[in-house]
Amino acid sequence: MVKQKTGWRLESSYTELPDRFYSRVEPNPVRSPQLVVFNDELAESLGLDPEMLKREEGVAVLAGNASPEGSAPLAQAYAGHQFGSFVNLGDGRAMLIGEQVTPDGERVDVQLKGSGRTPYSRGGDGRAALGPMLREYIISEAMHALGIPTTRSLAVVATGEVTLRKEPLPGAVLTRTAASHLRVGTFQYAAALEDRDALKALADYAIGRHYPEAAESDNPYLALFRNVAQRQAALIAKWQLAGFVHGVMNTDNMTISGETIDYGPCAFMNAYDPATVFSSIDIQGRYAYGNQPSIGGWNLARFAEALLPLIHEDAEQAAKLCQAELEAYIGRFQSEMLEGMRAKLGLFNKESGDEALIDALLKMMREQGADYTNTFRALSSAGAGKPDLFESNDFKEWQAGWQERLGRQEAGAEEAAELMRRSNPAVIPRNHRVEEALEAAGEGDLTVLNRLLAVLRDPYAYTEEQDAYASPPPPSDRPYRTYCGT
Ligand code: AMP
Ligand code: MG
């Protein structure tokens, strides 16, 4: 009989870095792994056979009970500024099982999250609870479908073990994939070693993996910085345009690849308000929706500090070069934002009054507490319910100005409407819908979760089924709260 292959093609280029960047770890088996959710489409794009992976032997790999061929599990070392304070960290509850080389020749990290203790676990148990891992699965896949660069979720496996949090909870392991898990915090870790060769090795590795063209530049490390800053500008603009609040933009949660990572306390904003915060521990609102672009800049400044010795031998010169790139980051963010907002309003060309038009709408939305997603959805689709905002005289006046502006562009009404439907999601993972799915899953009913995943798969489809998922949560006397490190 021919032995069927799952399709693992794992490599371990990360181990070419000096030993201090990682620790070899052993998989930590769990009692009785059971597959809860699996991403067929992602598996196929990785060159993995979904049916093989869903079998007992495949699930054992996804639970950390067996190692696939070619796997050399390791936990990565990194540091980070957490809410502004520098800390040494590392994968405390995750292990990289390897880098899968896909049929397209891409290299993709495959990581188990919740897979047990590592040398970087500090006081933690190395484990994860089912609810938060399913939450990461739902939101990361929704982000991908929205067109926002992100790590992805291949599977969630329940462990059959209890994870002790405030209360005993069912445990789970998430299989996450990423272009890489290199973070700003990885560079901060390298800089703190005060070993120029180690720092250079890391920077060369990042360039080779993500920005190979930077190697050709006169100053490859400045080019690395520029590329990361530009990628982050584009990413954070996409977050803002979608109303996404990351919630814990510590420097260890900012990738070098420009993918969104770490779906702990994140959530989508309902009523438009730049002060929106969901995380229970973000008392000062450091990571509020409206602060994300400037925090992105703050984090990049920490990245620059780590890279300075490679950028120029004269520290002052190095800082000046980075400062110019940080200004370019702001410029890029603003232009991505303006372009994205124009698209949300069906505008193809540029006019000098566009910013004022956009600002006026946002101001009204804020004053009237209008739902962010549904306001743009209603502007995009005649069939969608009209928010109360649309009844006000201010809005009617604004709308007349907007219609005039649309009339002045070459593109016709149909083209503009199409652009708007491509730019304004009909559905986002609403917090109450996510909670409802997690609650049912906790009781063993996966139908609610699967239905939610299905409507989120094509958020720009404007199907009838999505209408039911578009409503904001019913009014509550308590604000929605999310939690870190769950
Ligand atoms: P996060 O807030 O998820 O970005 O996590 C910050 C750091 O805490 C990372 O180094 C994690 O690996 C670590 N961590 C979070 N939860 C646990 C846990 N249950 N056990 C060990 N380490 C953890
Ligand atoms: Mg993290």
Image (tube, rainbow, N blue to C red):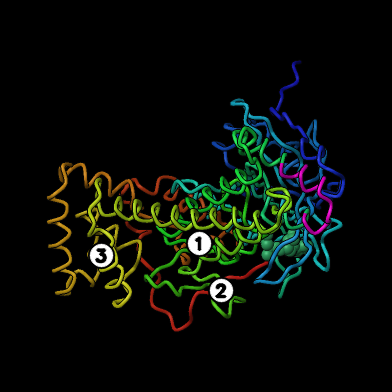
Q: Is residue 200 magenta?
A: yes
The local secondary structure at tag 3 comes to: helix
Q: Nearer the viewer, residue 412 or 314?
A: 314
Q: Is residue 486 visible?
A: no
Q: Give residue 219's position: percent from left, percent from top.
A: 64, 41
Residue under label 1, please give it: 434
Q: Position of residue 456 (x, y in %)?
A: 44, 50
Within-10-Å neighbours for mark 2: few <14, some 14–19, many 20+: some
344, above or below 267, in the image: above
Quarter where residue 372 is shown? bottom left
Give the overall secondary structure of the magenta segment: helix
Residue 268 spot, x, y in % from top left: 46, 63
**Dot 3 beta carbon under 8 Å from ligand 1:** no
Amino acid under label 1?
A: Val
Q: Is residue 118 magenta?
A: no
Q: Earlier in the sequence, mark 2 or mark 1?
A: 2
From the viewer's perspective, is residue 340 above or below residue 293?
Answer: above
Residue behind label 1 places its C-beta within 8 angstroms of ligand 1: no
Residue located beneath label 3 in the image: 356
- Name the residue located 34 percent from the left edge and 49 percent from the top edge: 423
Q: Is residue 428 left or right of residue 94?
A: left
Total marks placed: 3
Which structural element holds mark 2? Answer: loop
Measured from the top left, where is residue 182 in percent x and y? 69, 48
The amino acid at mark 2 is Arg
The residue at which mark 2 appears reads as 286
Q: Which residues are magenta?
A: 191-203
